[in-house]
Image (cartoon, rainbow, N blue to C red):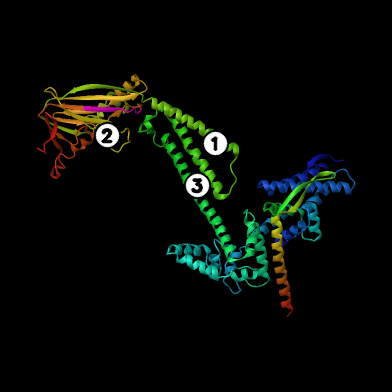
Amino acid sequence: MKKTLNINIGNSIIHIEEDACELLNTYLIEVKQHFGKSADDFEIVSDIENRIAEMFTEMLHTQQKQVIELADVQVVIELMGSVKDFENESAEEEPEPYRNAHSSGFGERKIFRDTEEAMAAGVCAGLSHYLRMDVSILRIIAVMTVFLGGSGLIAYLILWVSIPRAVTRAEKMAMKGEAFNLQGFKRNFEEEMSNLKDSFRNAGDHMRPFVKESGTFVTEFAEVLGTFVRTAGKTILKFIAIVIMISASMALISALISVAALLGFWDSSTTEIFPLNIVDKAYFSTFVIAALFVVIIPLFSLILLSIRVAFNSRSINKMFSYALLLLWICALSVAIFYTAKISTEFKEDAEFTQNVPLKAYPLYTLSIDRSRFFSREDSLRYQLSAKEYTGRIIQDDKSGPFKAPRNVSIRIEKSEGALPSLTESYSSQGINFETALYHAKNIHYDFTQKDSVLKFSPQLHLMKNVNWRNQQVKLVLRVPVGVKLNIDRDLDRYLQGYSLWDCGDEEHREEPYQAIMTAEGLKCIFDQ
Amino acid sequence: MRKGILEYCVLLIISRGEIYASDIIAELKSAKLLVVEGTLYPLLTRLKNNGLLNYNWVESTGGPPRKYYTLTPDGVSILSQLDGTWQELSFAIAQSKESKKN
C-alpha cells in the first residue's frame, strides 16, 4: 500500500504516488532554476509542465490505471531530458569565435562591400576584411579624412560605386578569405542563423531583405542613409545617455559626501561656517537631509532613465517611481518650510550704538589688527587661563573658516567739538525686535587705542551658538579739523565714503595714506 | 550545425499549418532530430520572441487548452531566406561529393 497525492499540473488533476511526486517535484525545481532567469523563461517552464501533464494523462489512459507511479515519472523525465541536456543545448548556442577566420583564412581574399556589418554602405567593413584590419580603426580614419577638406567623402563615394557588394554566399566568403569548401559553408550557415536571430531583435529590420532585392543604387542609397541615421543616431543617443549617467552618478556621490561633511562627519564645526550658520542648529540636520533628498531624487531618476536608454533595460517599477515622487515632494515641502522659517528670521532690524571717547592726539595712525581680544565668555569657551596666556597675543586665523560676509565698515567724519570720538553701532536682524536686539548684543568687536594708534579688527565675531542674522558693525570715527591721519592701506576696503585708492602716486604706494581733516572733510595730503 | 537545422525544420513543420507543440515533437522524433523534448520549448520561445512565431490557445476535448503555433509574416520571409541558404548548402555538398569522385 502506498500513499497517493492529488496534484494540479498544467491545469490537470493527476493522482500520483508520494515517491513519484517527490521525484517530479525535484525535477521541476531543477528545471525552474535552470530557466528561471526572466519572464520569458517562465513560459518555457509552464510549457514543459503542460507537456508533462499531457504525458501523464496519456499514460493513465493507455495503461488503464488510476495513479502515476515512480517508473512513469522516470520515463517522462527521460523523454523530457534532464537539466544537463538543456545545459549542453545552451552551450552549443555560444557562437564560436569565427572572427579569427581572418588569420586562418586559406582562400584568396577579394574585395567586396560588407553590407551586413555596415555603418553606411559597408565600404569600411569590406576594406577591413580585405586589409585584415580592425574596422573601427578604418572608420576613425574615414571620419577624420572627411574633415580634411572632404576628400574622404569623395573617396568613400568612389569606393562605394566601384566596389561590388557581397551578395552571394561565395562572395561573402571570398570577402572574408574563407576557403571555398564545405567547412566554410557550414560555418556560414550557422553564422547566418545566429545573425538572423540577432537582427530580428531590432524591429523594422525585416524590411531590409526586400529593399536589398531591388538592388538599384538609388534605393540602396536611401536605405543606407536610413540605417546610418538609425544606427549612428542610436549610438550617439546611447553615448549621450552614458555621459549623463556618469556625470549624474558623480553629482550624486558628491552630494552624498558633502551632506556627510555638512552633518559633521569630519569637522563638527560646520554649522559655524557661513552660509550654513544661517540655519539654526535645532533643525540643521533635518534641513540638510531634506535638501539632500530634493537634490538626489531627480539625479537618481536621471540615472535610471539614462540606463534605460543606454542599455535598453526595462523601465522601473511603477510603485517604486511613485514612492520616489512622493518622497521628493515630502522632502521639497520640508525644505520649503524651513526656508520660509529661516527667511522670517530676517524680518526685523535692531541696532544699538555706543560711544567710545578717544584720547586727543594731533596725529592718529589707523591700522587693521588681527589680534583677538577675548571676552569673559570666550575665555570660558576656549578654556583660557590668565596664567598661560599672559603676555601672549592670539592672532585670528586669516585662512580660518569663512564665518560671515564683510560686516565691518568705517567712516571718518569731522567732529563737531574739539574732541575725537568713535561711535560703534551694532545691528542685526531677527524674527522680532527682541531677538534682533539679542543678536546685536551678542556681537563681539575688537577696537583698541594704544596712544595715537587706533587698531580695528577686520571682522566681528559671533558668540557661540549664534546664527548669522546679518550682524554688522558700523564705526564712525569723528576727528576735529586739522588732525592728521595715517591710514593703513589694508584699511582701505573697510572705509566707506572715501576712496583713498588714488591718494598718493607711484612713489608712495607702499606707505600708509596720509590724510588731513579739513572743514570740507578728509583730504589727501599727497595731493596738496 | 544541428542547431540551425533544427530551427529550420521547426519552421518548415509549422509553415504547413497551425500545429500543436506535442505534434511538432512527434514529427521531430520520427525524423530523429530531437533527443529530449525539453529542448524544444526554449527553442519555440526564442523563435516566438524573435517574432517568427505566434500562438493561439485552442480548447481541446477533455483537457486544458493547447497552444497552437503559426508562422508570422516575418517567419515566412525568414523561411524563404533559409530555403535559399539550404539550396546553396546542398548544392555545395553535392559539388564536393562530385569533386571527390573525380
Of residues A214 and A526, the one nearer the viewer is A214
Residue located farthest toward the right when viewing the structure as drawn? A64
- Asked if residue A402 lies left or right of residue B2, the reply is left
**Which residue has dot 2 on it?**
A396
Q: Is residue A312 above or below residue A173?
A: above
Q: Identify the residue at horizontal 89%, vertical 45% (top origin).
A: A65
Quick one: label 3 or label 1, which is nearer the N terminus?
3
Q: Identify the residue at horizontal 72%, vertical 62% (top origin).
A: B5
Judged from the image, the secondary structure of the residue bearing numbered disc 3 is: helix
Instruction: Please state, as top left, top right, bottom left or bottom right, where the C terminus of chain A lies in the image.
Output: top left
Q: Is residue A432 above or below residue A310?
A: above
Q: Identify the residue at horizontal 31%, vertical 21% (top origin).
A: A437
Quarter holding residue A486: top left
- Asked if residue A241 lies left or right of residue A411, the reply is right
Mark 1 chain: A
Q: For label 3, count other residues whose C-alpha is less than 10 Å away and answer few (under 14), some (14-19) or many (20+).
A: many
Residue type, label 3: Met
Proximity of marks 2 and 3: CB atoms separated by less than 8 Å: no
Residue A155: where, in percent of width, then height? 49, 68
Residue type, label 2: Asp
Residue located farthest toward the bottom when viewing the structure as drawn? B102
Judged from the image, the secondary structure of the residue bearing numbered disc 2 is: loop
Residue A368: where, in percent of width, then height? 21, 34
**Which residue has dot 3 on it?**
A245
Judge whether residue A472 is colored magenta: yes
Disc nearest the viewer among 2 and 3: 3
- Asked if residue A15 lies left or right of residue A445, the reply is right
As drawn, the label of residue A324 is: 1
Q: Is residue B7 above or below residue A49?
A: below
Q: Mark 1 to mark 2: distance in Å?
A: 47 Å
Of residues A496 and A4, the one nearer the viewer is A496
